[in-house]
Image (spheres, grey):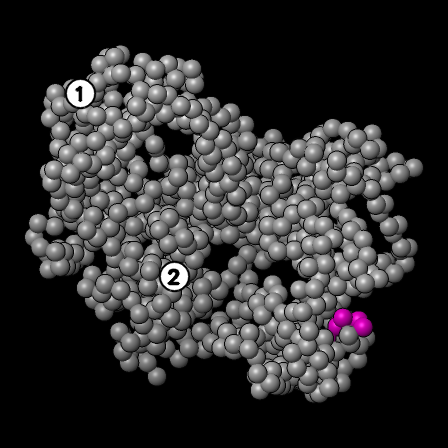
Amino acid sequence: MPKNLLIVESPAKAKTIEKILGKDFEVKSCYGHIRDLEKAGMGIDLEKNYKPRYIVPEDKQKVVRDLKALAKKSDEVWLATDEDREGEAISWHLCEVLGLDPKTTKRIVFHEITKPAIQSAVQNPRTVDMNLVNAQQARRILDRIVGFELSPVLWRKISMRNNLSAGRVQSVAVRLIAEREREINAFATQSNFKIEAWFTAKDSNDKNISFKAEGSKYSSADDAESFLKSCIGAEYKVNDIQVKPAKRSPAPPFTTSTLQQEASRKLGYSVSRTMLLAQRLYENGHITYMRTDSVNLSNTALGDLTRTIKGMYGEEYHQFRKFKTKSEGAQEAHEAIRPTYMKNITVHDADSKRLYELIWKRTMACQMSDAELERTIAKINISTNKEELTAQGEVLKFDGFLKVYREDRDDDEINEEDPSTGSGEGMLPPLIVGQQLPLKEMKAIERFSRPLPRYTEASLVKKLEELGIGRPSTYAPTISTILKRGYVEKRDKEGIKRDYRVFILENDNIKKIVDQETTGAERSKLFPTDLGLVVTDFLKQYFDDIMDYGFTARIEEEFDEVAEGKMKWNKMIDDFYNPFKKDVEKTIETAERVKGERELGIDPISGKPIVARMGRFGPMIQIGIADENEKPHFAALKKGQSIETITLEEALDLFKLPLTLGEYEGQEVYVNMGRFGPYVKWGEDFISLPKGEDPLEVDMDRAVELINQKQEADAPIATYDGKPVTKGKGRFGPYIKWNDMFINVPRRYNFDELSDTDIKELLEAKIKKEANRYIKQWPEEKIAIENARWGPVLKFGKKILRVPKKADDTKYTVEELSSISLDEVKKMIETQMPDAFMKKAAKKSAGKKAAPKKRTPKKKK
């Protein structure tokens, strides 16, 4: 038995470190946090100075038991959890659970998993830093208080199902997205006319080449046209030439935030995917620790970079640099994110390869020479009106760091007026002062002002970092939470066609044309939902501190002060909680329920008011007011529509469905909108419309075409045990169907040409799997006992519940469960869902709901 037990957070990390330390150490994983606040009563004793009540969750009890057993057998226990506050807290929790003294237990930290770093850490252990533990504990407790106190307020005051939540950082992030959306909706587009002239001149090879020069902007079409008229018959002469040297310097090495931003821009990765891959790279020893605010590089790394750059590119490509970290709290993380060994240009893992190569290139570039440019600016005089045009060109004289890497920019950083933020300027031909230039054509092109773009995940992270909100470890979970809660959605937006005017001066004649451009197209942007907008408005009205950017940033600074030992964590919580609790009590008492209503107008058919509002199941349109005589009509908003922007006409369109088209082969055909999009219904068959097809544009001929396609696709492709086998493509990919059983078809099969052998193989594997799946089932009650990965589970409808232990605290065997009665199983379910069968009984006793009245759609003229 090894003398030393070393505990780390992840199993992958454990394997890598165990190989380095050898036989004297056994390295085991605690699989992240082993304790958390209990949920009952918030898990915090507010009367006892915010004392937390921690429990070991059920899924971590086996891990803890195993670690306790190993700790007893070992001479010494070492803690090697991650080097941030979260990791420090996990080490403290391990001390508490394993009965170790945090003042004497050896705690080691390292920012890279290499032999020198691990051996150095073992030779220089420290103890658990309680300041860092208290900073993490303060964050966890504060966030729990905000969540537990605010969420019930939202449940009471907002007309939605009780799945709402609020959070100190998440609510501010939603506010940023909501405010940007409203800025875009309120933005008044203005147009101006940009002057562009094209000339020809000979290059060094005596060939004529074209180049562009730009003039002033004009706010009106009349002014632009007048300028072009004033250029009729003009001569164009080079008035002045300036040649200026310029330099571009590389960006600093990656921090957590800048890695998330650049991986989003260059690779299209979400923030959570970037962190997942970076964690894997770190645990396998490929990069340094991936949660850091620091841009510092160690002397070892700088020496490694110097050798690599000089060896690969030569002496002239190396330039030593020291980057300064902006964040004051960055002393906890010692280095920027970099490869552990620069000689490793790539990694073999296909998923992590692209991210690793991005980190390698950025790290290389930060110690490489500036790129040297030569920028030429030529001023061209117009003889008829004494105005000037400007032509600019750029020549790369020495590529320097650009040989390896060029940083991308966000949409809101790209400025059409500043060439340095664009894709780069073209080259100019050799020009001399006094040279006459022949004009090919001059245009005045209408251009429109644009609002700031919506946030991407990357630009949101950047904004949060600029405001001092959150820290590296919080960005990925914050974005995941606001998406999961339905406050924000990430989607594409199709562009719309827009006319723009162009005046063209050519051969001393002016002509006017109207051209078209696509505007407003966006990809993978963050849009606030109506729910997100309503919740944001409510929180801003009643909890202005929580939603204030400066206040949230100050809280982060106070966490840093706790980490530095300058502030007591429970005093910090107390200063926050007392005024916050008063706001909660006042809001519950005085605030009215929020519906997020917006009046749109009057229904032309019934004469009743039309309102867009939040309903229990989301945003909807309501025609009429609830009274004793008649219920209102309701329609859900379509994806991409919003209460704040929907028009009366768009709202009325929602009530045109379901739309009856007629009969086909004796069965009614109609088109409607469903949970998964628009569809045609024919008899008992549902046929989804192709993506992008408007259900209101579907006529009978198109419906019949879709029905025939569906019949052809549903025709049996084989029989098995005397029953037909059909195939299709669903939400989760291609499948075959037999005897009401759906079987996914893996990629290794050729779905278009499935053989009888393939079908038999797929069916028999599924039948065998299903036979082993159920221990016992009651289909009519939607109850089953199933075999799961970690043992038997109860299935009740779509819910998966644990099988409780017997009265003597032992587990049920499969044999015992196979003979258990339905009543016993119902009791097991009721212990975990007390009102499970009450709801069912209530539904049975309730009478049938009256069918909603159909509205007759207006005939198109």
Image depth: mark 2 or mark 1 in front: 1
Q: Is residue 733 visible?
A: yes
Looking at the rendered structure, the secondary structure element under dot 1 is strand
Q: Which of 512/448 is in front?
A: 512
| Depicted 281 relative to depicted 302: above or below | below
Left or right, residue 826 beside residue 73:
right
- State which quarter of the image contains the C terminus: top right
- Residue displayed at 49% across by 77% down: 748
Name the residue tied to disc 1: 237
Does the magenta segment cover residue 247?
no
- State which quarter of the image contains the N terminus: bottom left
Does the magenta segment cover residue 782?
yes
Amino acid type assigned to the residue bearing label 1 in the image:
Lys
Amino acid type assigned to the residue bearing label 2 in the image:
Leu
Residue 721 numbered tag:
none
Res 725 quadrant in image? bottom right
Looking at the rendered structure, the secondary structure element under dot 2 is helix
Res 591 quadrant in image? top right
Res 786 quadrant in image? bottom right
Residue 832 point in image, percent of width and height: 71, 65
Total numbered labels placed on residues in the image: 2
Q: Is residue 567 visible?
A: no
Name the residue tied to disc 2: 277
| Depicted 745 relative to depicted 127: above or below | below
Q: CA distance from mark 2 to mark 1?
A: 58 Å
| Depicted 170 relative to depicted 90: above or below | above
Left or right, residue 610 beside residue 511:
right
Residue 661 point in image, percent of width and height: 78, 51
Label 2 crowd bin: few (<14), some (14–19), many (20+), radius 10 Å = some
> Which stretch did the figure color magenta?
780-784
Among the two numbered marks 2 and 1 on one chain, the one whose residue lies closer to the N terminus: 1
